[in-house]
Image (cartoon, rainbow, N blue to C red):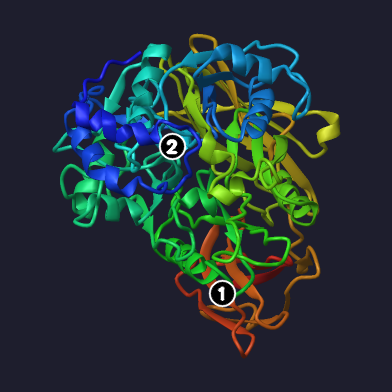
Amino acid sequence: MRQIVLPFFVLLSFTAIAQHDLPHELAPGEQSLIPAYRDSRAGTSRGISTPPAFPVRTMAEWEEVQAVVVTWTSYTGILKQIVRHAKEECEVIIVCDDEASVSDYLQNSQYGGPIPDLNNITFLEEDFNSIWCRDFGPETIYRNEVDSVMLLDWIYNRPRPEDDGLSDALATQMGLPIYSTTQAPYDLVHTGGNFMADGFGTAFSSELVLDENGPSGQFNQTVKTEAQVDDIMEQFMGIQQGRYVKMTTLPYDAIHHIDMHMKLIDEETLLIGEFPVGISDGPTLESNIQSIISNYNSVFGTPYRIVRVPMPSSTGGAYPPSASYRTFANNIFLNKTILVPTYRDEYDTTGLRILRETLPGYNIVGIDCDDNDQNIISASGAIHCITKAIGVDDPLLISHQRLSDTYETVIPYTVEAYMRHRSGIANAQLYWTVDTTQGFAALPMTDQGSGNWAGAIPAQAAGTEVFYYVEGTSVSGKTQVRPIVAPEGWWKFDVLDISAGISETDGPSIVDVFPNPTSSLVMITISSAANERVVVRLLDALGREVMRLHEGEVPSDKRVFADISALSEGAYSVVVESKNGRITARVLKR
């Protein structure tokens, strides 16, 4: 157990928060404890408090993990269900007061019955204050992208010293080095629920991170400007300058954590909670997403893909601030399983379907977070808030930008992937099929240098669906696939018919594309439901987005204009998408 010497008056002050059933927000009486807590952090030596002397990379949540951490206190029925499913994917570290009592609970008849065995479960008897380990637990960082795994700890924004120091105990338990932004001039207040990274130097947070490190911060050792916050994130976590996206805090989200309404599910895709139009935090959230789309591209240099999932209401139809912050975005990746908070069937059916369609092959498991005696969502948190994953110590990193739908029926479809392992990549394979029930054919990928590999899927006839995934093998013999669930999961693209528009559902329709062919200006006339929000994109023959023509409600005159004079001659496709469907039409540039 860690030994931290605190002044006697500080110990007395913190006696009031020794209990574990603390809310996600400040508990009654905690406000007065903040000054003593802040002062005690300044004198606490934890980890390595200077920046790494080498490049670092912060792990993305969909990468391979070796362990997940929970702190065993309140909402034990939910924790038991998490343990039941998580132990099949990775080690589960249960931080607790008493191993025997937790073991007995895991094997009793409640909440799904006894867990058959305790394999892959580690009990760690350590001091802690609350269940919200997402916020105070350590982040995973890697030296030189993949060389070695390390942990990173921030100052926790609650006056809960045992929570704040738990990362050190976890580092000791796992035998991992830990860096710490707890000492000036590198002190940084932050929480895991307000941070998401793409694994390649991009990160997202709400502006809470600026507020808590700025002049109005209550927990910070020193006042930081946004530039100073960005500098610390770059030095300790590898978040690149200009790639740390900070969004306006939502009015009715009391904790201002982005994991309550969004989720980065791969390098270019954002899962976004959707309120009814004009309701609750919907307008601010929509403004934030439009700002991201307008000002940032993914690491691939293309706009982010947006997948929307409904935000459930209360049983009476209410939304925040008149109801709890029910959300499907507060889920966690654990290798091939995703644990998702659920609420009631009328919303769960849709929410889980969207996740399964968006992330094929994953074991999507719903856990009720709105049950009478396990109503954790009323405490402003769910599954993601009470779990913390730790990355593997030997990652084989693979990144790939999925292929878009295409009109190409002659030229093979090039698949490119970035692969890294500390021993090097020995070989890579591309697997593809037009019928997943018949298995996948393997094609060798060629080393392009600098970690880049490429292969090509043979051209297919119009109307074909193509499914594929990639695989890398390291010099040391480790093999990894992407998506991590392949071959049960895959990427897919359609070979479209260039001779006609294709309507996939009863969504918007394209009335006219005029003039067609065109050398410069083109007008797209759209038919859709009143006030329907659409995205209008222009794709090249390989399905790559070359222009985003419109995003938002359909214009009152139903027309979208574009100047494509700067584009190369050839065939392009106009794609109009809404939550109700998609329509594609052809346009020729002369």
Residue 286, given in percent of the width and then of the height, sits at: 51, 67
Tag of residue 199: 2
Q: Is residue 280 left or right of residue 186?
A: right
Location of the N terminus (image quadrant)? top left
Residue 200, given in percent of the width and then of the height, sits at: 40, 39
- Image quadrant assignment for residue 251: bottom left
Helix, strand or loop at mark 1: strand
Ranked by sequence position, the earlier of labels 1 and 2 is: 2
What amino acid type is highlighted by mark number 1? Gly
Residue 514, given in percent of the width and then of the height, sits at: 64, 83
From this view, report whether residue 545 is shown above or below residue 583.
above
Helix, strand or loop at mark 2: loop
Q: Are marks 1 and 2 in contact (CB under 8 Å)?
A: no
Q: Is residue 117 left or right of residue 244?
A: right
Tell which of 400 and 346 is nearer to you: 346
- Image quadrant assignment for residue 17: top left
From this view, report whether residue 297 is shown above or below residue 104.
below
Q: Is residue 512 visible?
A: no
Disc 1: which residue: 552
Q: Is residue 325 visible?
A: yes
